[in-house]
Structure formats: structure tokens, C-alpha cells
Image: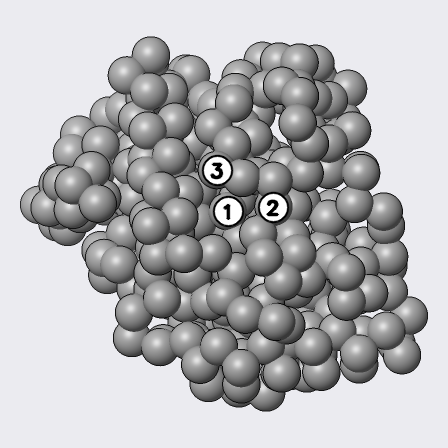
């Protein structure tokens, strides 16, 4: 708990003076005011994060956490659970979607086991296993409070280590069969809405199975009664180890003044936990895309964020988040290299 408390104390608001200076710089560029839209907003946000009108984002890293879920036994996922174990090493080897994209973009991928249902260590994957998956939330809490805190602190540790090694942008990702179920539960609790409003197909459920999944979530919330004012209680009652670790990575990035790109639905659930733990954490977040999961819009509304891309993606892994890496570079290149109104002959 000490590491979490210390990290929360370190998180500060964005530097508004620097943001004003960045906006003034943008407004002097040779273009109509505001005409680059969200690209301008990104540059101003990044300036406030880095506390510098000019900034270097050369080294970028995807941090992906993997864990399994006891609620899988309730028939809430279309795929077999062993896929978690089989797929997370592919993050490190670079042959899954996010790994392949990372190779193309010359970015780093850090894969972390926080709760995969296996005994052995996984090749190329950091071993931070808390235990072999959460408990079934349909029968009781997902984890103990101590385990919830530990998952968050693992995320903080991994993120801060990546930053210490030079990463200037982090994106978060995950792997965990059935993890849209706890994610929907978390969003439902914070939104104070019926689970059917935020529960979707996951990796490919039929409409009938989606209804079953929503019922399981509704009953899990009723059984466990998570306190929406206490993020750790929500994580403990209906969350997942990888979701807690993602929340921790967000907090670690915010404490070290590094932007963190959210991937999609599951990362938005983690982001809600992080924001509840520290309101200013949301200032360091950049939402990448509108996931095909129905709870995405509600989660983003609660976060006060707008996603940039509309790609109808629902893969996870960090695959949507990493697509923002070149967009950040493009925005920064325009910001640094466009002619000013005074210099332009247009």
C-alpha cells in the first residue's frame, strides 16, 4: 500500500502556463485558428504533461498485462481459457497483432503475467503472478483487498521501470479470456447502470450469450455489493488482476509526467479505477479508439475523454492504442515544423 500511496502523492495537475504557451505557438502557425482540430489539442496536452513547449517522444512502449478469470466457468466467453497462456508470449515475440504493429513502428512491448492460469513461467513474459486467476465473481469477490492493491502496485512498478529506461509515451494493453466481463462490471458500478447497457459480445458471443453474460454480471454485483466510491473495493469485488495492473500503470505514468494511451474497452475500465484513485490521473490519459463494445461510450463519458479513432476494433492487446503512436509524432512534427504566419507568404 505504501507504494500506491506514494505514487498518488506524486501526481500533479498539468502545467497550465506551459499549455497556454503551447497554444500561443500553435495559433501563430500558418493556418486558420483551430483548423488542425484534435492534433492541436494533443500538442497542448502533451506540453502540459511534459512541462515543456517542445518535447521528445522518441521512445514508446506498450505495457501489456495478462490474467485469467474465475468467472470464465459461468460460460461468459466464446474462447477457451488456455488462449491467455498461449497468446501472451506472442506479445513479447512480436507475432500477435500488437507485437507485429510494435515491430513496424519500432516500439517496445513489455508483456507481464499477473494472473495467468498456469504453473510454468512463460517465455519472454515478466513473471509477477499474484495467483492463477481471480476467483469467480458470481460466487464471491474476485480477490482480496491485499491482492487488489498488489495488482495496482505491480502496474506502477512496471510502468515506472519502463519510464526510468527512457520511455516517453506508454500505451497499456491486456490479455485475458473473459476479461470483458469484469470490465463491464466495473463500468456498470461506476456508471450506476444496469449491466445490459454496457455488456457486449467480447470475442464473439451470440446475442443469447450476451444476455446471459449481463445476468451473471448483475448477479455478481448484487452478491458482492462493490462500493463505487472506493476503487480498490470495486477492483477487489468484481475486477481482474490485469485490470488492476493497467490502472497502476496509468497512475505510474501520471506520477512521472508521461502520457498514457488507453487501448479500448478493458483499458477504459482500468482508467476509471485510476481516475477514482486520483482525479488528475485522467489528465495524462489519451483515449485511442471507440471499441465495438457498447460500454465504451459510457466509460469515456465518465472519464471525460473523447477517443480519436473509429475503427470498429475489439481485439484488445493494446492494438488500438499503439495505432496512436504515429499520430502523436505527426501532430508533434506539424507543431514544430510548420511556418508561422509571419514567415509564410500564403
- The colour scheme applied to this rendered structure is one colour
The span from disc 2 to disc 3 (Cα, nearest Å) is 8 Å
Could you tell me which quadrant the C terminus lies in?
top left
Q: What residue is disc 1 on? A: 241
Q: What residue is disc 2 on? A: 133
Between residues 337 and 255, which one lies in front from this camera angle?
Answer: 255
Q: What residue is disc 3 on? A: 130
Residue in the image at 51% along x and 32% along y: 129
Between residues 25 and 62, which one lies in front from this camera angle?
Answer: 62
Residue in the image at 61% along x and 40% along y: 132
Q: Position of residue 275 (x, y in %)?
A: 31, 59
Residue in the image at 66% along x and 13% along y: 123
Q: Which of marks 2 and 1 is nearer the N terminus?
A: 2
- Give neighbour class at mark 1: few <14, some 14-19, many 20+ (Cα, 10 Å): many
Between residues 241 and 208, which one lies in front from this camera angle?
Answer: 241
Q: In the rendered image, is residue 158 in sight?
A: yes
Which label sits on residue 334? none
Amino acid at each position: 500500500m505504501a507504494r500506491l500511496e506514494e505514487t498518488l502523492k506524486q501526481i500533479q495537475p498539468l502545467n497550465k502556463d506551459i499549455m497556454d504557451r503551447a497554444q500561443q505557438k500553435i495559433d501563430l502557425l500558418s493556418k486558420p485558428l483551430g483548423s488542425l482540430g484534435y492534433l492541436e489539442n494533443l500538442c497542448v496536452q502533451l506540453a502540459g504533461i511534459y512541462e515543456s513547449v517542445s518535447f521528445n517522444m522518441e521512445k514508446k512502449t506498450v505495457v501489456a498485462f495478462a490474467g485469467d478469470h474465475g468467472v470464465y466457468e459461468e460460460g461468459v466467453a466464446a474462447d477457451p481459457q488456455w488462449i491467455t497462456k498461449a497468446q501472451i508470449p506472442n506479445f513479447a515475440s512480436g507475432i500477435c497483432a500488437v507485437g507485429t504493429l510494435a515491430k513496424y513502428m519500432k516500439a517496445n512491448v513489455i508483456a507481464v503475467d499477473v494472473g495467468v492460469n498456469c504453473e510454468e513461467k512463460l517465455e519472454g513474459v515478466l513473471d509477477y503472478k499474484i495467483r492463477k486467476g481471480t476467483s469467480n465473481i458470481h460466487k464471491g469477490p474476485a480477490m482480496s483487498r491485499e491482492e487488489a492493491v498488489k495488482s495496482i502496485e505491480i502496474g506502477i512498478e512496471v510502468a515506472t521501470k519502463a519510464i526510468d529506461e527512457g520511455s516517453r509515451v506508454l500505451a497499456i494493453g491486456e490479455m485475458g479470456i473473459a476479461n470483458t466481463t469484469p470490465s463491464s462490471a466495473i463500468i456498470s458500478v461506476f456508471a450506476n447502470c444496469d449491466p445490459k447497457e454496457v455488456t457486449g459480445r467480447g470475442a464473439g458471443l451470440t446475442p443469447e450469450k450476451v444476455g446471459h453474460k449481463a445476468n451473471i454480471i448483475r448477479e455478481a454485483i448484487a452478491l458482492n455489493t462493490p462500493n463505487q466510491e472506493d476503487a480498490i473495493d470495486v477492483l477487489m469485488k468484481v475486477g481482474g488482476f490485469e485490470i488492476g495492473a493497467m490502472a497502476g500503470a496509468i497512475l505510474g505514468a501520471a506520477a512521472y509526467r508521461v502520457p498514457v494511451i488507453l487501448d479500448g474497452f478493458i483499458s477504459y475500465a482500468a482508467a476509471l479505477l485510476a481516475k477514482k484513485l486520483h482525479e488528475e490521473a485522467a489528465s495524462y490519459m489519451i483515449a485511442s479508439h471507440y471499441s465495438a463494445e457498447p460500454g465504451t461510450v459510457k466509460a469515456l463519458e465518465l472519464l471525460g475523454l473523447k477517443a480519436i479513432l473509429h475503427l470498429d476494433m475489439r481485439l484488445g492487446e493494446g492494438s488500438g492504442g499503439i495505432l496512436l503512436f504515429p499520430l502523436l509524432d505527426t501532430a508533434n512534427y506539424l507543431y514544430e515544423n510548420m511556418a508561422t504566419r509571419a514567415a509564410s507568404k500564403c
